[in-house]
Image (cartoon, helix red, strand yellow):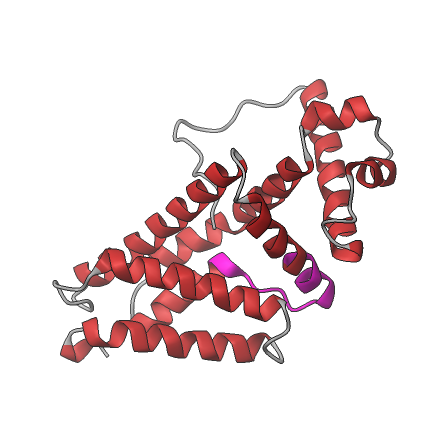
Amino acid sequence: MYAEEKKAGGERPRKGKREKNAETLRRKILDTSRALIADIGYEKATITRIRQAANVSIATFYKYFDSKQAILIALLRNEHELISEAVNAAIGASVANPTDYLMSIILASLDPPEEPEFRAMWREIVAASVLITAHEPAAEDMRADRALYCTKMRDALQKLHGTGHLRSDAPIEHIVDIIYFVCSMEFQEYVCGTYKDRGAMIAHLRTLIEVLIRPWLNGDAT
């Protein structure tokens, strides 16, 4: 659930007017797509409707996106870029309680929205994501996204091992996979309205994470 980290090597070069205009147009199409998906759903948010709402030509649309699937992937990447800094900060934080530590990383990555319109948008995006994973190259993008998320969670668990909270024989790879699937399902349940509010989802998710890692914590780390 993350975008790729920026490569080291200093600040990015300043963008020229043409690049800024292109970025503005691309952002306009994405923002329009996000609003339409939240309002009428992914299926009804056709390319024609998106470009008409964004007031761009067919040629302009296809200059930036070759399909509606490409828009969906771009929306996901954009959201992940926005939370990347918060996730890295959570991983780098000190550990007082292992469950609280993992939950801070999970919530930074999920960033579950409270506003009904954003929950509706994510409900549509989640549903559409399931459909497009049956097709390449969308499936490859989704796999890459999962791999990066798992890398972040693996870093967190290895830190818990390094601080003496996690036992040396803890099956880190299996725990990473379980956390990924549990968090994905809980987020899906939340945006689909299973929980009455954000707090209820967070409380349930915390219980699941605690049950998962408790057997693998050192005696004085609970």
Quarter of the image holding residue 16?
top right
Q: As displayed, is residue 78 above or below residue 179?
A: above
Specify whether 49 is left or right of 204.
Answer: right
Total marks in image:
0
Depth check, front residue: 212 or 219 = 212
Name the side, left or right, on which 93 lies relative to 75.
Answer: left
| Frontmost residue, 192 versus 20 | 192
Return the x and y of residue 114 as percentages of the image width and height.
65, 69
Counting from the top left corner in percent of width and height, residue 202 is at 49, 74
- Viewer-proximal residue among 187 and 135: 135
Residue 202 horizontal side relative to residue 22, left or right = left
Q: Could you tell me which residue is drawn at 53 percent across and 75 percent down?
A: 201
Figure quadrant of residue 172: bottom left
Magenta includes 119? yes
Q: Position of residue 75 (x, y in %)?
A: 63, 44
Q: Quadrant of residue 14?
A: top right
Q: Residue 97: within the magenta?
A: no
Q: Is residue 97 visible?
A: no
Asked if 97 appears above or below 4 in the picture, the reply is below
Name the outermost residue toward the left: 168
The magenta stretch is: 109-122
Name the chief secondary structure element in magenta.
helix
User: Residue at (70%, 67%) from the top-left corner?
Assistant: 115
Q: Where does residue 94 sit, x and y in percent of width and height?
A: 31, 63
The answer to whether 189 is drawn above or below residue 77 in the figure is below
Image quadrant containing the C terminus: bottom left
Does residue 102 show up? Answer: yes
